[in-house]
Amino acid sequence: MTTNNNTSHAPHAASATKAGLTTLDPGAGYVTTMNTYTVAPERVEEVLDYLVRSAVETVRYVPGFVSMNFHVSVDRTQIVNYGQWKSREAMAAARENPKIVALMSETAKIAGSSKPIPYDLRQSVAAAMSNPGLVRLGPWKA
């Protein structure tokens, strides 16, 4: 998944190169974090602006950071931040970084509380027509 289709109603898109876009590949070894923020619909653009600005100005420079994607629910009451890190160690080190610690505190005040939950990508299934020659199955563990 390496497209950058910004369908936002406001100018939230940060410029990115193809190399910096999210890749959904179970073999990449990345750790994914998902944060969900519950917001009032009238605040969604303000909070989204803050989250994107934080990523662009601070988080993207932290060693081990890969990418962040921001999703707004259709009813505009939730923002999900889907982030990728090179490893669990990089993610843990980021949480000890004084700039990130301060940013997390400020984010809680502006966006509300959120608990980043780490995930390992296990499977990714593409549409049948997107690349008919590529089928990636496994590794499954019984």
Image (cartoon, rainbow, N blue to C red):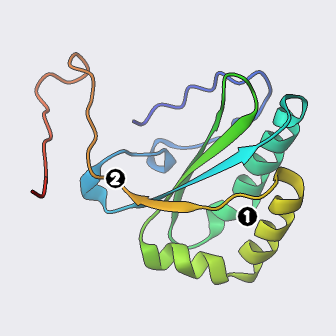
Q: Which residue lies at the image location 26% right of the left edge and 45% below the top edge?
A: 123
Q: Disc number at residue 121?
A: 2
- In x, y percent, where is residue 135? 13, 34
Label 1 packing within 10 angstroms: few (<14), some (14-19), many (20+): few
**Rendered location of residue 105, percent (x, y):** 82, 69
Q: How many marks?
A: 2
Which quadrant of the view contains residue 112?
bottom right
**First in sequence: mark 1 or mark 2?**
1
Identity of the residue furthest to the top in this view? 129
Q: Quadrant of residue 108?
A: bottom right
Which quadrant does the N terminus fall into?
Answer: top left
Residue 116 is left or right of residue 107, and the answer is left
Between residues 132 and 108, which one lies in front from this camera angle?
108
Q: Which amino acid does the dot numbered 2 rest on?
A: Leu
Q: In this image, 61 relative to 86: left or right?
A: right
Residue 25 in view here: yes
Relative to 133, is 101 on the left or the right? right
Structural crowding at the residue carrying mark 2, measured as other residues with C-alpha within 10 Å and reported as few (<14), some (14–19) or many (≥20): some
User: In the image, residue 81 lies at what x, y percent?
Assistant: 62, 47
Point out the image quarter for the C terminus: bottom left
Which residue matches tag 1?
58
Looking at the image, which residue is at 54% across and 31% down? 4
Please tell me whether mark 1 sits on a helix, a strand or a loop. Answer: loop
